[in-house]
Structures are given as C-alpha cells and as structure tokens.
Image (cartoon, rainbow, N blue to C red):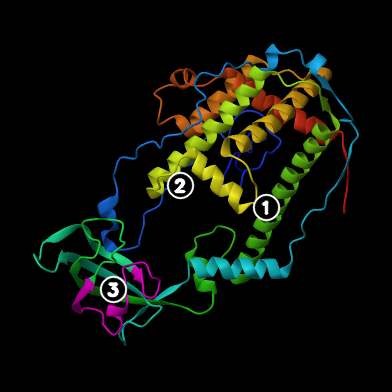
Amino acid sequence: MKKKYILFAVFMATVTVLSGCTRKTAQDEAATSESTEAPAEAAESGTDVEESSSSIDVSGLKTTTLMDVDLDKLVTLGEYKGIEVVLSKKEVTDEDVENSLKSSYQSNPLMKEVTDRAIENGDTANIDFEGKYADTKEAFDGGTSQGYDLKIGSGSFIPGFEDGLIGVSAGETVDLNLTFPENYGSANLAGKDVIFTVKVNSIKTAEEEPTDEWVESLGLEDAKTLDEYRAHLREELEQDAEDQYNEELRNTAVSQVVDSATVDNVPEELYNRYFVMVYNSVSSYVQQMQMAYGTQVTVEQYVENIMQSNGISGTAEDYLSDVANQQTKRCMVLQAVANKEGIEIPQETIDEHIQEDYDSYFYQSYDTVDAYKETVISEDYREQIMAEKVADFIVENATVKAE
C-alpha cells in the first residue's frame, strides 16, 4: 500500500485541510498525458512553459518552526485521550463487485479481430496515417503515425477523421480531406485544409461480455476465471474500504482533538511558515498543470476558480490565509500533544524517512541521498513524522463506535 502522509495534502479538486502539518506527499506526481484531440497534437509538445506571475509575494516573509515557540503558553489542550469517534466502515456488496467488474472490462475489453466486414462505429482500427497541407502537400509536424489504435466514435481526432474510416476494410488506404477547427490549439493548423492518407491495418471489436478468456489475458496470478476475478475484485474493494476507513478515522479523531483545544495566540512567523508552504504547494500544482496541459493561469486565478465552484467569497489571498491559519493551529495542537506525551522524533528516524523518499522517488533526480538531503528541510520531515505518530497515538487511545 502506498505510504500515506497525514501532513499537508493540498489543492487537487478542492482545497481541504487534512490532519497534517508541513508538506505534501514525498512525490508530487505531475499530471502528464498525451493529448489525442487530433493526430497533429504532438506538434504542440515540448513547448517551454513560462511561470505565471502572481501578486502574492512570499519571498520576504520571516518564518519560524514549532520547535522555536513555547507551545505550553500558547496551546491549552482539551480532551485528546479516550475521545469517542463514531464511524462506520463501508461494507462491500455483490453489486459493488459487479460494478467494478463492469468498469474493469469496459476500460480494457477482450478484443477480437474482424476479417469479414468493414469498419463500423465502435470498432478499434489499427492505422498508419500521414497528414499533409491540402495546398502544398507538405506533411505537417505531429500528423504522422504508424500502428495507431483508434476507437471509432471516441472523438479522439478532429471532426470527420473517424467518420471517414467507417466502411473502410482492412488493407485499404483512403485519403480524408478535412479542415482543422478554427479554434484549434496550434496556430499552424487552425482552420487549415488538410489531407490525411490513412491505411487500415486491422479491425478489432470488443466482446460484449467478460469471459474466462479475458481474465486469462489479464495475467493475474490469483485469478484465471471470472469467479476467481470476482473474488480478486472483492479483496481489492475490501482493502480500499479498510484504507479509506483508517484514513477517515485518523482525520476525524485528529480534528476532534484540534477542535477541543484552545490556541491563545498564533505567532506571526509560525503562521508565515505555513502560508509559504500553502502558497508554494498551490504554485507547484499550477505549474504542473501548465506543463501537462499548457494552461496559463496564476495561483490567484486557480484558487479563485476553486472558491467560485465551492461558493466561497473573498480574495484568493484571504482564502490561502484561512487555510494557513487552520494548518498552523492544527500543527501547534499536534505538537502540544507530542510534548505532553513525550513523543520525540530522533534524527535517525528522520534520516530513514529521507532515505525512503530518495529510494522511492528521487533517486533519478539526485546522484546520492546526500545530494537530495541538501534540498530538503529536516524540520519538515520531523513535523511530518511527529504528526503521524501523534495521530496514531490519538486513534490508539480513542473509543470507536459504529454509526
């Protein structure tokens, strides 16, 4: 199971403050995918992405850490041992298993080659194609491919391309006279008349229902028949339900402890620490979107879109400030519990976590773990591990009841 962090998990679909403290997960996985809007889409790849400007400046903010403030004077803990948490685990039903089976098959059906008819809507055609400008007959960048599997009717390519292949048989070659949309992303192709020369290599269609043969094609060690695959899916769903339950239990328990505590004062430099982290996390995610999709938005625009979709008023900076305030309070309370219970994080443990992250995520980016260490802040790791251990302590001492 992928390691979970109870630390700061920031801004994906919506912004939520979980029961964490410092940073996001060890590896921010950039959302990378190849666009299939049209065969020429590759012409737009490799473009340098400029960092969008932002009116929020965090560069000059002075910061401090939890270890540098007197939390005994700032935090009054409420109940944190023996709290009652009411929570039920999701039960996996036969319907859940069948829905999972259906979804799995739809995403990867068993394909059978068609030899006795031409292409129909819904088929998958394996094609070679070359795109040329209609006036010059010059091939354009990104418009050529071989052995491409195209599902007819998917809308993956520009209008007319897929419809133009309906009725074509395997082994045949056709010329498709098409026009790129006026609003197409590449200026070199927008509104241009083009000719695609397409050879159909083969035609395949999906079997309507999953079979034992399909299960065999998945190459699973523990499932060779449909019944065995259903058992496999049930085990996966039950593990997912268990993971979700444990995560929700930890978050709910920690939230109760934080809500019951009183934070008399939030030191400005400590607040600055988490505001910078919140801002940098969002900025990093925005840059990932730019690289993946070519979107050009500022941090403020991105946050404002989230606020609008959730009916939240105010400015982006106000919203980020509110998130940072919540993070700061949460981390202060967790550290106060650690102080009271004598939960300490030795440097040896911090080094072990840094090594794990290096081995799992960063070994290709840095020649040695020492080189990676130079780029990280040890206190970030300490707070992260502390938050995990305190959350475990709270849950272990809680009374959990089903709803």
Please tell me whether mark 1 sits on a helix, a strand or a loop. helix
Q: Quadrant of the N terminus?
A: top right
Residue range corresponding to the magenta coloring: 150-178
Using the image, tell me which numbered label, if any, was put on residue 240. Answer: 1
Other residues around mark 3 within 10 Å, as few (<14) / some (14–19) / many (≥20): many
Q: Residue furthest front?
A: 314
- Which amino acid type corresponds to the residue marked 2 in the rendered image? Ala
Which residue is drawn at the image coordinates 71% and 36% (left, top)?
19
Label 2 vs 3, first from the N-terminus: 2
Q: Looking at the picture, tell me which residue is in the foreground, 327 or 352.
A: 327
Using the image, tell me which numbered label, if any, was put on residue 31. Answer: 2
- In the visual, does 103 lie left or right of 291? right
Which residue is drawn at the image coordinates 54% and 59% (left, top)?
220
* Residue contact between numbered discs 2 and 1, judged by CB atoms under 8 Å: no
Label 1 vs 3, first from the N-terminus: 3
* Residue under pointer 3: 161
- In the visual, does 38 lie left or right of 343? left
Other residues around mark 2 within 10 Å, as few (<14) / some (14–19) / many (≥20): few
Q: Looking at the picture, tell me which residue is in the foreground, 273 or 209.
A: 273
Residue 42 sits in which quadrant? bottom left
